[in-house]
Amino acid sequence: MKIFERMARHEHEQFVLCSDTASGLKAIIAIHDTTLGPSLGGCRMWPYASEDEALEDVARLSRGMTYKAAAAGLNLGGGKSVLIGDPKKDKSEAMFRVFGRFIQGLSGRYITAEDVGTSVSDMVHVRMETRFVTGIPSSQGGSGDPSPFTALGVFRGMKACAAHVFGTDDLSGRRVAIQGMGNTYLRAEGASLLVTDIDAERVKRAVSELGAEGVAPDAIHAADVDIFSPAALGGIINDQTIPLLKARIVAGSANNQLADEGKHGDELRARGILYAPDFVINSGGLINVANELVGYNRDLATAQVNGIGDIITRIITLAETHRVSTHIGSAGPANRSVGLDEPFHDIHRHVEPVERRHEVGTGHHRAHFLKEAPRDGHAGRGPLLAGLPHLLPDGLRHPHARHLVVEELGVPVIAERQDADADRDLDVGDSRQVCLEIPRVVQRLREDIVGAGGHLVPQALDVQVDVDRGGVGAAADQ
């Protein structure tokens, strides 16, 4: 497939090919959508059989990150990067530093993090060349390895699925087949684990430390279990594996679990198997590293990740109400929030057309890297920004809170103040004012103050802040 055809198929904004002979770097950065903010997604290193295979993988992964960020309620877009090579023998500090320089050249359009085949130490090397990297050690102001948060989100989502299927979220005694080992909370919950992994040593460790039962990789799909948890690479739910499944729930941390999203989502539903959409249930790691961008707070990140179970529950309800697969039930709202084509045709809401995405996203780019800006850590944020249809009055045209403030409801900006001339950087001040307005809007939405065709009277908010960067004038503290 030609490269522009591939981009057009899922409406990617940008592909960046990166090459450096001296370090051996061959990398591809894919930016899918930046409507809600700069793209963020991990850096994967894998020995792809061909460049075309690498391009297809990064295209699908970056698209999934757009969905993941939208469903999690983050002011971020979808991006991903892949390094072509064997992570066991081809890595070097030079390679990741060169890659960091390529990221720096994108001026914040793409923010990276660790992924399959890369580590926190690799991100430290990337950090030497660019600030647009997350998942760095706490000693350097980051949050460290995000995988425990991914595991926590999967655990919460799995419990939500169990509550729906079995009538209780208690996983004790449930048999869970895990394909691909990683962080897990299941053993502490009392679940019975069957595990497999291409790394035999990891299976041995799980058997020894977790009391798990090891099974052959080609036997895991047909295991007699309650829950099948894909935690390795994508495409594992396909024509060959679906007929083998005995589990009543598919819920795992792998990306792009459905080989054919529409077809295989419908087939799981037809067989009575509840599927937890991967880009929702595995968003815990993304939520965690996204918090680094606004000043990391572990308690806040944990609280947000714990909310994944509630989002999964809403998606299940939505899908059942409209008699569609849970994949369609979740992808539809995520599509609406970024203005992409809408597969959920029976629920109509106006969204910004493609040509206005950059305009709508401008406020996100302004505010995201202002370390002094208040973080969006309010209680209603997660479910609101998931964009689920029943959570917003019909009169409000866009499911994203920042868009509601900037485009729908109005906000008094510093440029309109009488003392505006005293501010040498109006963009910084305006972005701060928008950040301050969002919690009030969300609270009023939660209290049903804003109804169909609703309107909020703009009012100025005063706050005293400490500003430690140049170019911000006196009006910014008002």
Image: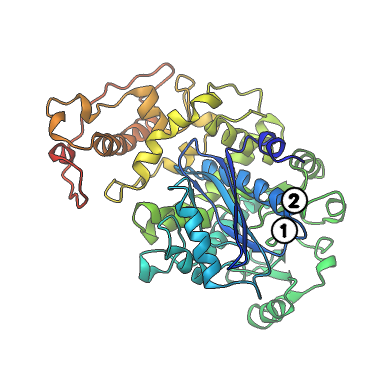
Quick check: 281 left or right of 357? right
Quick check: 375 left or right of 24? left
Q: Is residue 112 above or below residue 176?
A: above
Q: Position of residue 210 (x, y in %)?
A: 64, 77
Q: Nearer the viewer, residue 38 or 235?
A: 38
Q: Are marks 2 and 1 in contact (CB under 8 Å)?
A: no
- Mark 2 or mark 1, earlier in chain: 2
Q: Residue 234: which quarter of the image?
A: bottom right
**Which label was assigned to residue 89?**
none
**Point 49% across, 54% down: residue:** 103
- Screen quadrant of the N terminus: top right
Q: Nearer the viewer, residue 95 or 125?
A: 95
Residue extending farthest to the top is 453
Q: CA distance from mark 2 to mark 1?
A: 34 Å
Q: Residues within 10 Å of mark 1 (few under 14, many from 20)?
A: many
Judging by the rendered image, the residue that carries numbered circle 1 is 227
Quick check: 105 left or right of 410? right
Q: Amino acid at mark 2?
A: Asp
Q: Tell me if I can see residue 75 in this picture.
A: yes
- Screen quadrant of the C terminus: top left
Q: Is residue 465 above or below residue 125?
A: above
Q: Amino acid at mark 1?
A: Ile
Q: Is residue 313 above or below residue 235?
A: above
Judging by the rendered image, the residue that carries numbered circle 2 is 52
Q: Residue 438: which quarter of the image?
A: top left
Quick check: 171 left or right of 132? right
Residue extending farthest to the front is 22
Q: Position of residue 95 (x, y in %)?
A: 55, 67
Q: Nearer the viewer, residue 474 or 393?
A: 474
- Describe the element under mark 2 as helix, strand or loop: helix
